[in-house]
Amino acid sequence: MLRVSFVSIPISDQDRSLKFYTEKLGFDVVTDQPFGNGTRWIQLRPPGAQTDVVLFTPPGQEERIGGFQSMAFTCEDVVGTCRMLKERGVEFVKDAERANWGGMEAIFKDPDGNTFVLANPNE
């Protein structure tokens, strides 16, 4: 059976991103080690998740930084999670609301301007 091991989030500053994803979003560090050319392989895991995120931008892929990311995060309570993340300083570009597909969703961004959907189809 195949599973997704990790997805990469394109970032410009690994230290700043590490601080954001651990302190503001609450992700745990799985690996933080040298990767070559002055970069590090930083692999994080959202609590309870089976898929990790990696804070790394491959050389030549810098144009991916700062756009809409084709990945979504989920939680049990989108409204409550938005409130908690806003208190931690996370910026939302779309507040929690009922989506046209029926669930609740919001959109937040990281320090590089990467935007992510936060959703729960069962709310």
Image (spheres, rainbow, N blue to C red):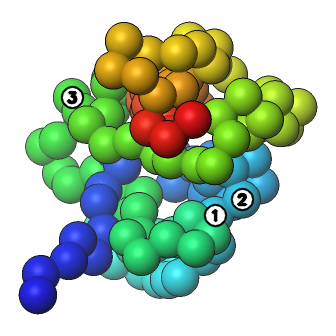
> Does 84 sit left or right of 67 as displayed?
right
Q: Which residue bears the numbered disc 2?
A: 26
Q: Earlier in the sequence, mark 3 or mark 1?
A: 1
Name which residue type carries label 2: Gly
Compared with residue 97, is residue 55 higher up or lower down, i.e. above or below? below
Q: Which residue bears the numbered disc 3?
A: 63
> Does 77 sit left or right of 68 as displayed?
right
Q: Which residue bears the numbered disc 1?
A: 27
Residue 66 point in image, percent of width and height: 38, 25
Q: CA distance from mark 2 to mark 1?
A: 4 Å
Q: Which quadrant of the figure contains the N terminus? A: bottom left
Q: Residue furthest bottom?
A: 1
Query: In the rendered structure, are the residues bearing label 2 and label 1 in contact, judged by CB atoms less than 8 Å apart?
Result: yes
- Residue at image position (63%, 49%) is 76
**Nearest the eye: 31 or 7:** 7
At mark 1, the secondary structure is loop
**Nearest the eye: 9 or 2:** 2
**Nearest the eye: 67 or 11:** 67
- Residue at image position (44%, 38%) is 121
Q: Which quadrant of the figure contains the C terminus? A: top right
> Does 7 sit left or right of 15 as displayed?
left
Neighbours of disc 3 within 10 Å: few (<14), some (14-19), many (20+):
few
At mark 3, the secondary structure is helix
Q: CA distance from mark 3 to mark 1?
A: 25 Å
Neighbours of disc 1 within 10 Å: few (<14), some (14-19), many (20+):
many
Q: Which of labels 3 and 2 is toward the front? A: 2
Residue 119 point in image, percent of width and height: 49, 35
Q: Earlier in the sequence, mark 3 or mark 2?
A: 2
At mark 2, the secondary structure is loop
